[in-house]
């Protein structure tokens, strides 16, 4: 059941005000915050969506947007929820349409004065000028976390548990694997997908099987994997968010996604009356501030110095443009 959040829930909400912006108008500044809605197919606590949600809350705190959201929206209900928010006067709608691509774009075409910024596996379409796309291109941070994993494994066997083998997951896994192999070219990988974005018990069960098969480090693309690592007293590498506070003796490093550059760019384009169909994926790159390696925290000083030197060098080279992490969207496999 879709739940509309019009008031503060878990301190996430404020009431909204109407926006004076009209998509495509000439350069202007809104007298009031841009009325913005988020539509999410999973809880806002889920790691990927949480990064969008946090960025939206920050923009609201600055006064740039007035934000409301719905979570746990089914793919079959997504188009209806879009239409309701558009009819309610929202001028910016953000979310993720991976399971409702065609339906979302059809509804967006009905509301040309509403800007859409959607997580998508597909590119922008000039024929739909109010529909921009993004994805978490955090392969740079994933690569660096892979270097650390490659240095920390003793068995040379790393387990990787993902949700679905779609581009936005595949590219991060490949980048992580490339980083690990640069540190240790003899590493073997166990790769599995659980067929869900949010099923911690299944992810945990899959991780246990990998541990039984010799993995001593786990790539935690899904919730539940770090729990398995903690219970079996092995290490884990985080993805998208930093969970070391919850797993201080387990999570060595994490590649963090910062959605703020993506959302801030869209807001600026709206404020200038220049929002158009575009691919915002580049704002997740490290040189745009879209990804970083989380502080090592409790593992500071425990990662081999050779690995940390390589991490620092690669990070500087990525930011300068002298080193590029390869983007590989193909499904990864075990080795």
Image (tube, helix red, strand yellow):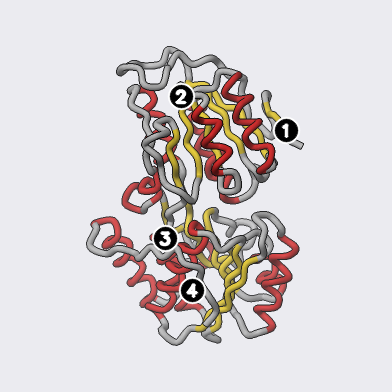
Question: Element at badge 3?
Answer: helix
- In the image: residue 36, left or right of residue 228: left
Nearer mark to the viewer, of 4 and 1 = 1
- Residue beneath label 2, please? 112
- Residue beneath label 1, please? 3
Crowding at dot 3, Cα within 10 Å, few <14 / some 14-19 / many 20+, comes out as: many
- In the image: residue 257, left or right of residue 202: left
Q: Quadrant of residue 198?
A: bottom right
Measure the alpha-carbon separation of dots 1 and 2: 26 Å
Nearer mark to the viewer, of 2 and 4 = 2
Q: Residue 207: give x, y in percent of width and height.
A: 67, 72
Crowding at dot 4, Cα within 10 Å, few <14 / some 14-19 / many 20+, comes out as: many
- Residue drawn at x 58%, y 38% is 103
Q: Is residue 325 above or below residue 67?
A: below
Mark with earlier residue (2, 4)? 2
Q: Residue 104: give x, y in percent of width and height.
A: 56, 37
Circle on res. 70: none
* The N terminus: image quadrant: top right
- Residue beneath label 4, please? 149
């Amino acid at each position: 059941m879709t739940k509309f959040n019009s008031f503060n829930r878990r301190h996430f909400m404020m009431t909204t005000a109407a926006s004076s912006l009209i998509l495509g108008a000439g350069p202007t500044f809104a007298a009031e915050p841009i009325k913005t809605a988020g539509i999410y197919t999973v809880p806002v606590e889920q790691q990927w969506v949480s990064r969008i949600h946090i960025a939206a809350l920050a923009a609201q705190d600055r006064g740039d947007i007035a934000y409301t959201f719905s979570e746990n929206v089914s793919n079959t209900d997504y188009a209806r929820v879009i239409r309701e928010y558009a009819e309610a006067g929202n001028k910016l709608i953000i979310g993720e349409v991976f399971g409702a691509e065609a339906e979302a774009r059809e509804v967006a075409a009905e509301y040309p004065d509403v800007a859409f910024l959607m997580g998508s596996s597909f590119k922008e379409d000039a024929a739909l000028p109010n529909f921009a796309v993004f994805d978490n291109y955090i392969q740079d941070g994933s690569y660096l976390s892979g270097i650390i994993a490659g240095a920390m494994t003793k068995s040379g066997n790393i387990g990787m548990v993902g949700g679905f083998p779609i581009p936005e997951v595949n590219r991060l896994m490949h980048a992580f694997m490339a980083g690990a192999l640069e540190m240790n070219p003899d590493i073997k990988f166990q790769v599995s997908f659980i067929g869900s974005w949010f099923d911690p018990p299944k992810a945990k069960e899959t991780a246990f099987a990998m541990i039984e098969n010799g993995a001593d480090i786990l790539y935690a693309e899904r919730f539940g994997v770090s729990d398995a690592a903690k219970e079996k007293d092995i290490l884990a590498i985080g993805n998208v968010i930093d969970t070391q506070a919850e797993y201080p003796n387990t999570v060595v490093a994490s590649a963090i996604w910062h959605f703020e550059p993506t959302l801030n760019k869209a807001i600026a384009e709206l404020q200038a009356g220049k929002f158009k169909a575009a691919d915002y994926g580049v704002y997740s790159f490290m040189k745009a501030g879209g990804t970083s390696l989380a502080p090592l925290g409790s593992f500071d000083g425990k990662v081999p110095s050779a690995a940390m030197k390589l991490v620092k060098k690669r990070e500087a080279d990525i930011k300068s443009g002298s080193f590029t992490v390869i983007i590989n969207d193909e499904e990864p496999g075990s080795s």
